């Protein structure tokens, strides 16, 4: 296959250890990636863990085929699983139906098996850097293994033909650590779904709020790595200033039951998806995002598209999309006092809060998923061309020396 005859309609194997209806940032991104590639005329075969013992193998409508592999629960996260290392099954699958390229989104046992299988079969492989597992390890009693986990991640990604990362900032950080062949795979947001027009007075009333009462919102996993203690501290400061304010937390996770016990006055509404999630965003006023372990942070552009002012640390999606005190507020990463002060300042100035929310919506209008998927398509085609050119050069050298 030469550069001139790279196929337009590619056969793409997408390997991921999480996918909807699971609720997390990687699953959400994979849904947009798979659907977007299919709409652009590519044939996508999805490989992922079976999410329940009774799940059928019927393929989602956007994919040409689907292979479900055995999975086991992820420690600390009920409802999430990682796939087992089915190396030989993947070899047989790709021998019978060889893809032009594989996109491997996760670095669990299934992801490692998939990368090994592509290397053995000579299939071009692109990996995605979607989760900072080395940072997560510090919150689950594995701090001593942080360096080893980081080295394992680097070795994994450097064996692929390219690694896609969500921001230029992260690409620079990873390059300094020795990661190679890094390219951007940004993120988009569905501005038709996430829209200020979905604000719901009845939903706000169910939270005990009137039109003028302040709703502070958090959306995401309720887990140690999300730094939720800071969000709680910021809201406590707001509540001392605004007694009628309400704190609504959307999501699930290992910290949910403890948080409910310790803070019965807050609204823990569980995980939401689709129009329900969009209504929850639009019915809030101020979005707090205190996480320090994000690879990207999909909730930031979702909140922006919903017309919310966001307070976050200055990295990942917040660094990429927020202009301080214009369409949101960013503070120096790790500065707890500055985070609380920014939340307090916005809570006490409703006019400014609304202005930042309107500007956030304007900025989100440029974050189109079709543009993002087009960029991924170009990267996949580029990897195929590079691999093909390398093989052609190798064949020429061999022929010349014989």
Image (cartoon, grey):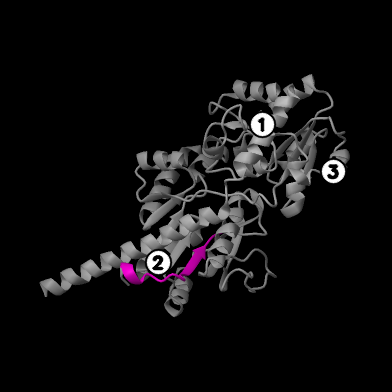
Query: According to the image, label 2 marks what residue?
Result: 118
Question: In the image, 364: left or right of 96?
Answer: right
The span from disc 1 to disc 2 (Cα, nearest Å) is 47 Å
Q: Quadrant of residue 317?
A: top right
Dot 2 surroundings within 10 Å: few (below 14), some, or many (20 or more)? many
- Residue 107 is a magenta residue: no
Viewer-proximal residue, 374 or 174?
374
The residue sitting at the left extreme is 401
The image position of residue 250, as x and y in percent, is 73, 43
Q: Are marks 1 and 3 in contact (CB under 8 Å)?
A: no
Question: In the image, 262: left or right of 303?
Answer: right
- Residue 13 is a magenta residue: yes
The image position of residue 346, as x and y in percent, is 70, 25
Q: Quadrant of residue 348?
A: top right
Residue for point 65% across, 74% down: 58
Residue for point 48% across, 73% down: 89
Element type at marker 1? helix
Vertical comparison of 12 with 134: above or below: below
Query: According to the image, label 3 marks what residue?
Result: 203
The image position of residue 241, as x and y in percent, is 78, 19
The answer to whether one can see residue 221 in this image is no
The span picked out in magenta is 3-17
Q: Are marks 3 and 2 in contact (CB under 8 Å)?
A: no
Q: For the C terminus, which image quadrant?
A: bottom left
Q: For the N terminus, which image quadrant?
A: bottom left
The span from disc 1 to disc 3 (Cα, nearest Å) is 23 Å
Query: According to the image, label 1 marks what residue?
Result: 356
The disc, 3 or 2, on the residue closer to the chain's N-terminal end is 2
Vertical comparison of 172 with 102: above or below: above
Determine which of the numbered discs, if any, sits on residue 90 in the image. none
The image position of residue 245, as x and y in percent, is 81, 28
């Amino acid at each position: 296959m030469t550069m001139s005859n790279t196929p337009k309609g590619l056969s793409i194997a997408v390997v991921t250890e999480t996918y909807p209806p699971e609720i997390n940032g990687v699953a959400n991104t994979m849904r947009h990636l798979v659907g977007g590639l299919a709409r652009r005329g590519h044939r996508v075969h999805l490989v992922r863990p079976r999410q329940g013992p009774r799940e059928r193998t019927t393929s989602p409508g956007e994919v040409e085929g689907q292979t479900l592999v055995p999975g086991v629960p992820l420690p600390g996260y009920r409802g999430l699983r990682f796939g087992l290392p089915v190396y030989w099954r993947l070899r047989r699958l790709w021998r019978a139906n060889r893809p032009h390229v594989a996109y491997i989104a996760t670095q669990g046992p299934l992801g490692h098996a998939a990368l090994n299988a592509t290397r053995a079969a000579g299939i071009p492989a692109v990996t995605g850097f979607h989760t900072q597992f080395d940072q997560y390890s510090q919150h689950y009693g594995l701090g001593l293994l942080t360096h080893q986990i980081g080295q394992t991640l680097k070795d994994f990604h450097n064996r692929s033909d390219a690694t896609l990362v969500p921001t230029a900032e992260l690409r620079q950080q990873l390059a300094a650590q020795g990661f190679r062949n890094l390219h951007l795979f940004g993120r988009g947001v569905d501005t038709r779904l996430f829209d200020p027009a979905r604000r719901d007075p009845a939903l706000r009333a169910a939270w005990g709020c009137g039109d003028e009462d302040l709703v502070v919102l958090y959306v995401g996993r309720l887990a140690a790595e999300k730094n939720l203690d800071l969000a709680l501290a910021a809201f406590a400061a707001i509540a001392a200033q605004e007694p009628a304010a309400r704190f609504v937390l959307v999501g699930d996770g290992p910290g949910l039951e403890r948080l409910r016990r310790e803070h019965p006055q807050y609204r823990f509404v569980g995980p939401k998806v689709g129009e329900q999630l969009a209504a929850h965003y639009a019915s809030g006023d101020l979005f707090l995002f205190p996480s320090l372990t994000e690879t990207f942070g999909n909730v930031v552009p979702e909140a922006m598209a919903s017309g919310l002012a966001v307070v976050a640390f200055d990295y990942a999606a917040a660094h990429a999309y927020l202009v301080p005190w214009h369409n949101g507020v960013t503070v120096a990463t790790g500065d707890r006092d500055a985070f609380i002060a920014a939340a307090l300042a916005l809570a006490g100035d409703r006019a400014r809060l609304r202005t930042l929310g309107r500007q956030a919506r304007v900025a989100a209008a440029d974050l189109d998923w079709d543009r993002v998927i087009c960029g991924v398509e170009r990267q996949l085609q580029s990897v195929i061309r590079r691999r093909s050119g390398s093989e052609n050069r190798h064949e020429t050298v061999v022929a010349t020396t014989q």
